[in-house]
Amino acid sequence: MKEKIGIASDHGGFELKEILKEELKKHSEMVDLGTHSQESVDYPQVIGSACQSLLEGKVDRLVVLCGTGIGASIIANRYNGIRAALCHDEFTAEMSRRHNNSNVLVLGGRILGKDLAIRILEKWLNTEFEGGRHEKRILMIEEISKASK
């Protein structure tokens, strides 16, 4: 069964989101979680709603975008159980999966070109978590997150 990957953006990431949707369809069952136009929206609402979809099990992993990726990264990482990684190249995308088991890929729609964004997405989709010594660190992150609530 194909993995279900959600994708969401604000207006600043909308154009790149539309391009990446086509790539996601090649690898997974793609779920568009908004926004659906370039009309201005508040990224905390759109990205927050998409994160809820991940936490509720409606999608297996999530890709979120805003203009720079910074705002989307900040809001996504506010949710307990989310490990969002803002990636600007293939290496950070790979390591975010291998060592950090990121379940949310964050991209800057106004920062990345189409070809690089596609390569980052493919690397993130095709890299598995190594586990081992990294599993202990993931558990530590989850404990810190729970304690800070």
Image (cartoon, rainbow, N blue to C red):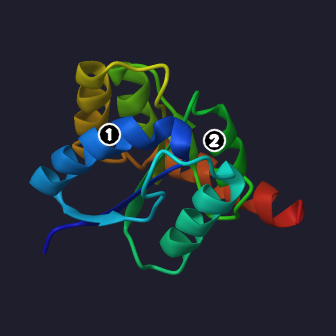
Q: What is the secondary structure assignment of the residue under circle 2?
A: helix
**Which image quadrant for residue 19?**
top left
Of 104 and 141, nearer the camera is 104
* Disc marking residue 73: 2
Q: Is residue 101 visible?
A: no
Q: Where the N terminus falls, by quadrant? A: bottom left
Q: Could you classify mark 1 by the number of other residues whose Cα lies within 10 Å: few (under 14), some (14-19), or many (20 or more)?
A: many
Q: Could you classify mark 2 by the number of other residues whose Cα lies within 10 Å: few (under 14), some (14-19), or many (20 or more)?
A: many
Q: Position of residue 41 (x, y in %)?
A: 63, 52
* Disc marking residue 28: none
Q: Is residue 35 above or below residue 92?
A: below
Residue found 43% across the figure and 65% down from its top: 33
Classify residue 53 as left or right of residue 28.
Answer: right
Q: Quick one: which residue is furthest to the right in this view?
A: 148
Name which of mark 2 and mark 1 comes first in the sequence. Answer: 2
Q: Position of residue 117 (x, y in %)?
A: 32, 27
Residue found 53% across the figure and 65% down from its top: 50
Of 19 and 28, nearer the camera is 19
Residue type highlighted by circle 2? Ser
Of 39 and 5, nearer the camera is 39
Q: Is residue 76 above or below residue 31?
A: above
* Disc marking residue 124: 1
Residue found 41% across the figure and 20% down from its top: 112
Q: Determine the CA span between mark 2 and mark 1.
A: 16 Å
Of 49 and 60, nearer the camera is 49
Q: Is residue 101 above or below residue 28?
A: above
Q: Quick one: which residue is furthest to the front in this view?
A: 39
